[in-house]
Image: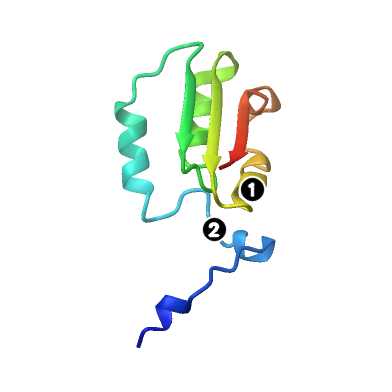
Amino acid sequence: MQDYLSYAFNDDESSVSIFDELPLWSAPFGLLLLKHFELAPFMTVVYIGSGAGFPLMEFAGRLGSSAKLYGVDTWAQANPRQSEDHTLPPEERRNIGLFRG
C-alpha cells in the first residue's frame, strides 16, 4: 500500500516527450497569470519551476525580443524540451535563458 514511497520518476528523454507544453493541472493557473500579469517592453522575467515551458514561452511571445526571460527548473530533461519550442520565431527564443537549479 505504500509503494508511492519508493516510486522513482523516470526522467529519460522518452518519458519527457509525453509531457505537453501545457499540462492540464497547471493550465488554469497559467492562464490566470497570463491574464493578470502586467507586461511591459524590456522586462526581465524569472520563472522558477518552468518545467516544460508553460507559460514561459507564452510570456516570451507576448513580450517580444526586447525582454529577457529566464526559466529555472530542477527537472534535468525539461530545459532541452523548452529549447526545442518552435512556436516562437528564432529572434524571440534568443532572449530566453534556461537553467537547471
Q: Circle 2 is placed at which residue position? A: 19
Residue placed under numbered mark 1 in the picture: 81
Q: Secondary structure beneath disc 1?
A: helix
Q: Residues within 10 Å of mark 1 (few under 14, many from 20)?
A: some
Hey, which residue is sitting farthest bottom in the picture? 1
Measuring from the top left, give residue 54's x and y in whole percent: 48, 42
Say which residue appears at 30% left-offset and 37% top-offset: 32
Question: Which dot marks residue 8?
Answer: none
The quadrant in which residue 64 appears is top right
Residue located 70% across and 27% down the image: 90
Q: Which residue is nearer to you in this view: 4 or 33?
A: 4
Q: Amino acid at mark 2?
A: Phe
The reply to whether the C-beta atoms of the residues labelled 2 and 1 are less than 8 Å apart is yes
Quarter of the figure that contains the N terminus = bottom left
First reached walking from the N terminus: tag 2 or tag 1: 2
CA gap between label 2 and label 1 equals 10 Å
Q: Is residue 36 above or below residue 42?
A: below
